[in-house]
């Protein structure tokens, strides 16, 4: 078993689009959310960021999907087996990724609100302004990953994440938004029990 500490850096702006509890409730009940004022829509959009008490985060499942999608889109293989299947079974993200600034401190708020004309799902209603909280290119996410099988090369996983950054992206409206490069990649072996 080994661990990877990685940091990705955005080469395109990042758009948040978290499903809020209100969105989930509306989805389950079939409600459309009704007619909202511009102020209500702005407030609702602010809730679309992924965050915890320390700042903005990228959920663990989203990070796992980056590895899976990068391996799949790149058609990467390991010993003639599709790498995405090996990643699914052997690679586990350790908690949410943390958005950090260039000094490594947590980012606590969005850079701007991305606004475009559009239709809300199911895209048959009247035109509205679609708003998503955004971070400007240069955003960074630090993540921790555990790899259960030492025979899975660290570089193969880095290739998968790099492919995701260029061809898939993270967040909403990808790959136009959310593209990134890998700027830090550190592997460390797990200490064996009973030894220091």
Image (spheres, rainbow, N blue to C red):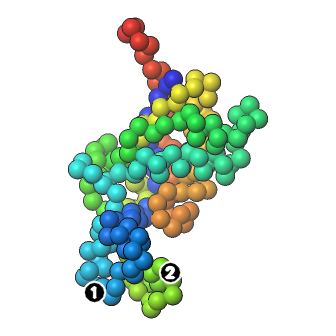
The answer to which of 87 and 155 lies nearer the viewer is 87
Q: Would you say 139 lies left or right of 75 here?
A: left
Residue 194, by quadrant, is top left
The answer to which of 122 and 99 lies nearer the viewer is 122
In the picture as drawn, the residue positioned furthest to the right comes out as: 80
Tell which circle, 1 or 2, labels the residue nearer the N-terminal end: 1
One can see residue 130 in this view? no
Q: Would you say 48 lies left or right of 145 here?
A: left
Q: Residue at x 30, y 85 (%)?
A: 36
One can see residue 89 in this view? yes
Q: Residue at x 59, y 46 (%)?
A: 68
Q: Residue at x 41, y 70 (%)?
A: 28
Residue 149, by quadrant, is top right
> Where 48 sits versus 11, above or below?
below
Q: CA distance from mark 1 to mark 2?
A: 19 Å
Using a 10 Å C-alpha cutoff, classify the residue at mark 2 as few (fewer than 14 neighbours), some (14 to 19) or many (20 or more): few
State the image coordinates of residue 49 (x, y, percent, origin top left).
34, 61
State the image coordinates of residue 170 (x, y, percent, origin top left).
49, 57
Q: Secondary structure at mark 1?
A: loop
Q: Residue at x 26, y 74 (%)?
A: 43
State the image coordinates of residue 91 (x, y, percent, origin top left).
53, 36
Q: Which residue is mark 1?
A: 37
In the picture as drawn, the residue positioned furthest to the left comes out as: 53
> Where 64 sits versus 149, above or below?
below
> Where 2 sits versus 139, above or below?
above
Front disc: 1 or 2: 2
Q: Which residue is mark 2?
A: 122
In the picture as drawn, the residue positioned furthest to the bottom comes out as: 126
Q: Secondary structure at mark 2?
A: loop
**So how many labels did they put on this image?**
2
């Amino acid at each position: 078993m080994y661990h990877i500490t990685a940091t990705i850096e955005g080469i395109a702006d990042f758009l948040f689009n978290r499903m809020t509890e209100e969105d989930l409730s509306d989805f389950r009940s079939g409600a459309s959310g009704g007619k909202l004022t511009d102020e209500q829509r702005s407030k609702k959009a602010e809730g679309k960021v992924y965050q915890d008490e320390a700042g903005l985060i990228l959920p663990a499942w989203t990070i796992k999907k980056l590895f899976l999608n990068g391996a799949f889109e790149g058609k990467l293989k390991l010993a003639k087996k599709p790498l995405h299947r090996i990643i699914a079974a052997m690679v586990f993200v350790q908690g949410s990724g943390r958005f950090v600034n260039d000094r490594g401190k947590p980012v606590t708020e969005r850079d701007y609100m991305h606004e475009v004309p559009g239709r809300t799902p199911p895209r048959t209603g009247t035109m509205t302004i679609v708003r998503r909280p955004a971070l400007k290119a240069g955003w960074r996410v630090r993540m921790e990953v555990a790899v259960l099988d030492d025979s899975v090369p660290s570089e193969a996983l880095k290739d998968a994440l790099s492919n995701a950054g260029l061809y898939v992206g993270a967040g909403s409206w990808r790959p136009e938004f959310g593209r990134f490069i890998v700027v830090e990649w550190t592997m460390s072996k797990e200490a064996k029990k009973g030894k220091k």
